[in-house]
Image (cartoon, rainbow, N blue to C red):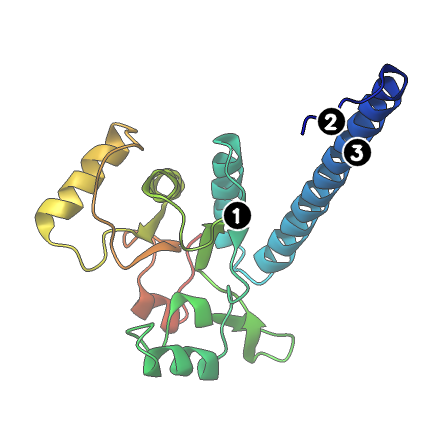
């Protein structure tokens, strides 16, 4: 049975529906704004746990990604204690006992207790580690432009690594490539600082 709405009710009903839609949009915009404020706040706090050399590099990478429309977020474990790193290794999520995430600098008493991570895992907040290939290629390209590297090639055969390099060089972020096992991971390029050098106390200028 077809229901007919009297004409005198149509205008108020349309207005009410429009108001509901507007309020819904307003709430969505407000929630998005709050989410972005928190992302920026989290990134600021996590950058503070990074080494002085790495901090502006990672900040520049984040700015680049935002310029491409992404919402980059530094993972909460940007700095890891030795016990946290050991737990990750035991779980098979890391292959090393000492990593760029566990680097410390000297405190006021001359002891190495200050968090000074040289690595950050950077994901798009909306999708986390499920981000698509274009994001990971964009992240890798930006990292390499700032004297850093990602784990996008880790564990891949030479042909796949070369294909990734070609896509990055051509800025072909839509390329169909296989991804290494840790594309979110960002650390200094090997020509700047190696893990053994970091452990020995060397710091890039």
Q: Is residue 53 visible?
A: no
Distance from label 3 to label 2 (Cα)? 22 Å
For image coordinates 53% across by 60% down, the residue present is 50
Distance from label 2 to label 1 (Cα)? 43 Å
Q: Quadrant of residue 174?
A: top left
Please give the residue where the numbered disc 1 appears in the rendered image.
Answer: 126
Question: Crowdedness of circle 3 by 10 Å Cα count: few (<14), some, many (20+)?
Answer: few
Q: Quadrant of residue 1?
A: top right
Q: First in sequence: mark 3 or mark 1?
A: 3
Q: Is residue 56 visible?
A: yes
Q: Circles 3 and 1: CB distance less than 8 Å?
A: no
Q: Circles 3 and 2: CB distance less than 8 Å?
A: no
From the viewer's perspective, tell me whether residue 98 is left or right of residue 30: left
Eye-nearest disc, 2 or 1: 2
| Element assignment for label 1 | loop
Q: Position of residue 136 (x, y in %)?
A: 35, 44
For image coordinates 33% across by 51% down, the residue present is 150
Distance from label 3 to label 1 (Cα)? 26 Å
Q: First in sequence: mark 2 or mark 1?
A: 2
Q: Position of residue 151 (x, y in %)?
A: 30, 55
For image coordinates 45% across by 81% down, the residue present is 82
Q: Circles 2 and 1: CB distance less than 8 Å?
A: no
Please give the residue where the numbered disc 2 appears in the rendered image.
Answer: 3
| Element assignment for label 3 | helix
Please give the residue where the numbered disc 3 appears in the rendered image.
Answer: 20
For image coordinates 21% across by 42% down, the residue present is 177
Q: Is residue 197 above or below residue 175?
A: below
Q: Is residue 61 above or below residue 203?
A: above
| Element assignment for label 2 | loop
Q: Position of residue 109 (x, y in %)?
A: 63, 80
Q: Position of residue 51 (x, y in %)?
A: 52, 60
């Amino acid at each position: 049975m077809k229901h007919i709405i009297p004409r005198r009710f149509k205008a108020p009903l349309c207005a009410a529906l429009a108001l509901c839609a507007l309020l819904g949009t307003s709430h969505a915009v407000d929630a998005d704004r709050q989410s972005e404020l928190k992302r920026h706040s989290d990134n600021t706090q996590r950058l503070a746990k990074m080494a002085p050399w790495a901090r502006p590099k990672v900040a520049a990478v984040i700015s680049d990604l935002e310029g491409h429309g992404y919402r980059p977020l530094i993972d909460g474990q940007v700095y890891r204690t030795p016990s946290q790193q050991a737990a990750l290794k035991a779980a098979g999520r890391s292959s090393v006992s000492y990593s760029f995430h566990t680097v410390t600098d000297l405190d006021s008493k001359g002891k190495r207790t200050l968090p000074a991570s040289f690595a950050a895992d950077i994901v798009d907040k909306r999708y986390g580690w499920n981000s698509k290939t274009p994001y990971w290629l964009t992240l890798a390209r930006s990292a390499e432009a700032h004297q850093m590297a990602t784990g996008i090639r880790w564990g891949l055969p030479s042909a796949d690594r070369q294909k990734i390099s070609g896509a990055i060089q051509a800025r072909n972020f839509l390329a169909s490539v296989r991804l290494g096992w840790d594309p979110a991971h960002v650390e200094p390029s090997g020509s700047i600082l190696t893990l053994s050098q970091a452990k020995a106390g060397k710091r890039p200028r």
